[in-house]
Image: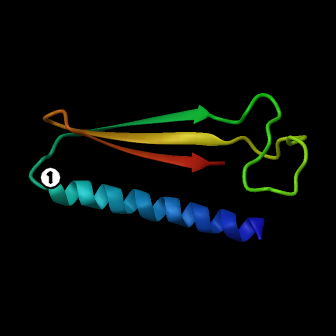
C-alpha cells in the first residue's frame, strides 16, 4: 500500500507542477523573460513526535525511514510577478 501511495503522490505532484507551469505560461504568453528558482528544505522532525492519523499508536515514532522535504519552485516574470509551487514528500 505504501508503494501505491508513493506512486500516486509522485504522479500527483508532477501533474500539479505541469498544470501550474501551463497555466502560468498561458496567462502570460506574451512574456518572454522568466526566472525560475528552486528551494529544498528538510522538514523531518529532529525529536520523536506522535504521528497524526494513527489513533492506535500510544508512543512517538521510533525511527525515520526516509527524510521529509518541502520543495518550492518560484517563477518570476519580467514585471516581477511571482508564482510559487510548494510540494512535500520524500
Q: Nearer the viewer, residue 58 or 80?
A: 58
Q: Residue at x 67, y 63 (%)?
A: 6
Judged left or right of residue 17, residue 41 is right
Q: Locate residue 33, reporting x and y percent.
A: 17, 40
Q: In the rendered view, does 30 fall on the left or right side of 53?
A: left
Residue 12 at x, y = what percent? Answer: 52, 65
Residue drawn where x is 59% and y is 62% of the image: 9
Residue at position x 18%, y 33% in the image: 80
Residue 89 in the image: state x and y as whole percent: 62, 49
**Eyeballing the image, is 87 above or below 37?**
below
Q: Which residue appears at 83% of the width and 34% of the height? A: 48
Kindly identify which residue carries mark 1.
28
Q: Residue furthest top?
A: 46
Q: Is residue 56 above or below residue 39?
A: below
Instruction: Report which quarter residue 42 is drawn in.
Output: top right
Kindly state the secondary structure of the residue where label 1 is placed. Answer: loop
Q: Depth check: give the residue in front, 17 or 32.
A: 17
Image quarter hosting the N terminus: bottom right
Amino acid at each position: 500500500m505504501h508503494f501505491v501511495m508513493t506512486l500516486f503522490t509522485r504522479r500527483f505532484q508532477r501533474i500539479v507542477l505541469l498544470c501550474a507551469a501551463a497555466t502560468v505560461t498561458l496567462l502570460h504568453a506574451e512574456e518572454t523573460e522568466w526566472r525560475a528558482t528552486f528551494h529544498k528544505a528538510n522538514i523531518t522532525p529532529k525529536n520523536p513526535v506522535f504521528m497524526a492519523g494513527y489513533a492506535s499508536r500510544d508512543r512517538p515514532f521510533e525511527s525515520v525511514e526516509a527524510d521529509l522535504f518541502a520543495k518550492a519552485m518560484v517563477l518570476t516574470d519580467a514585471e516581477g510577478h511571482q508564482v510559487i509551487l510548494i510540494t512535500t514528500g520524500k
